[in-house]
Amino acid sequence: MTEATARTRDGAPDPAAAESAASDRVRDAARAHAREAAGADPDVPAYDLIELFFFAYRDFVSDPDRILDDYGFGRAHHRVLHFVSRNPGLTIAELLEILRITKQSLNRVLKELIEKGFVEARPGTTDRRQRLLFVTQDGGALALRLARLQTRRVGRALADTPPEGRAAVVDFLLAMIDPDGRAAVTRRVAGPDGGSGGAT
Amino acid sequence: MTEATARTRDGAPDPAAAESAASDRVRDAARAHAREAAGADPDVPAYDLIELFFFAYRDFVSDPDRILDDYGFGRAHHRVLHFVSRNPGLTIAELLEILRITKQSLNRVLKELIEKGFVEARPGTTDRRQRLLFVTQDGGALALRLARLQTRRVGRALADTPPEGRAAVVDFLLAMIDPDGRAAVTRRVAGPDGGSGGAT
DNA sequence: CCGGTTATGTCAGCCTTGTTGACATATCTC
DNA sequence: GAGATATGTCAACAAGGCTGACATAACCGG
């Protein structure tokens, strides 16, 4: 089943031996390209990074997808579950800001998560119009399971990377985000469990 | 318009000065986390990388989305246009393999791209059942325009990154891809224009 | 306490992009 | 000539976005 994918337009078969050679070849080419083109001349398209990013993300989300299927959930449910799990007591408005979708779209999946007992909504204490969102035990367990799946992939990908390389990856991803959202994202990433100070 | 997004649960306002401080704080936290957790203990979720990747990809695709809207195209059209532009003479079967969607889904968007004059299909020379796909001048121009947009973002993100850091980013993205698909991806990335030898 | 704003829910309908299943056509290959 | 292959197409459906309009409850300022 891999053969079909492994064969390209040149029609050359690709046994395991040739594969790592090809891998090396491309990594070198990509590195050379990154060195010469990226950041320097914006008119020379960085096709390698663009396609790499596309395929990497595709596989990154494919892991959870398979599990979510068993629960009748989709990617939208995953995102909600994830951010509620990470930010207990999140309000609807805050969640909408993070996901950047409409409340109608959110409500559809949120309703299902609540009905199936993965998320719980409690009225706000200071402002009783608000609904504070929390994961249930089941919800927390599922969220953790999915996060671990993705962590494993990220871990594998960084396994051979030295600390400086990991920092470069983090900086790269951070810099890929729009400046507007960057502050919010960074605070959110560091906040819930990263920052020792909590709400600073 | 940024304020709403820039304010978080702590309610602290966030002027430009505080922003970079926050950014630094998080980068450090993320780096620390990456150092200790990623790759080491798969049971400690790498929340930072996971969320960073999510937000980075979201903004990465948002640039083209805006332009495509003007043409009445969506992301699906973009993907087809991109890979046809990058692989002139691509067959339907090859494109299906790359995108991993059904031929019905592909045909819907491909038909529109052909009708609007962005892609052209020519019968294969050796096998006349095949339809070899090419971009038209308009199609090539649009594909390039979109690629440049994304290149600019990637370029900005890598601007301050030294060559070793860029190599680390490339390696990371490559390693995020499923091993099955990795060979195909690498060959495709290096093949069309990266490898000096063409079809090796 | 009243009126306006805010937080949220909901109904209805639409679009894009994915899916499955079934069937048609032309071409290649043995 | 028969069967496999490359592709097209019709129909129906699902997920997950969107807009617009309207309802309700709670807050807040005067």
Image (cartoon, coloured by chain):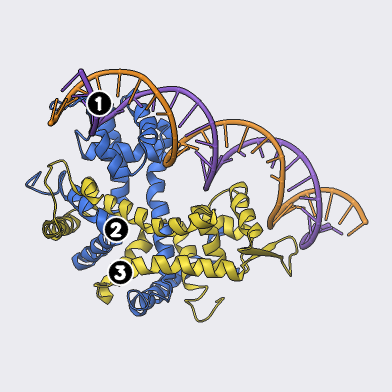
Chain colours: A yellow, B blue, C orange, D purple
**x and y percent of residue B7 in the render?**
56, 64
Q: Is residue A133 above or below residue A38?
A: below
The chain that hosts pointer 1 is B
**x and y percent of residue A88 in the render?**
60, 70
Q: Both on one chain, marks 2 and 3?
A: no
The chain that hosts pointer 2 is B
Q: Secondary structure at mark 2?
A: loop
Which of the pair B13/D18 is nearer the observer?
D18
Amino acid type indicated by mark 1: Ala
**B187 left or right of B111 in image:** left
The residue to which callout 2 is attached is B178
The residue to which callout 3 is attached is A156
Task: Give neighbour class at mark 1: few <14, some 14-19, many 20+ (Cα, 10 Å).
Answer: some
Q: Determine whether label 2 and label 3 are within 8 Å by CB.
A: no
Amino acid type indicated by mark 3: Arg
Report the mark closest to the observer, 1 or 2: 2
The dot on residue B121 is 1
Give the mark, 1 or 2, whose residue is nearer the N terminus.
1
Q: Both on one chain, marks 1 and 3?
A: no
Which of the pair A44/A51 is nearer the observer?
A51
The image quadrant that residue A179 belongs to is bottom left
Between the C-alphas of marks 1 and 2, the distance is: 31 Å
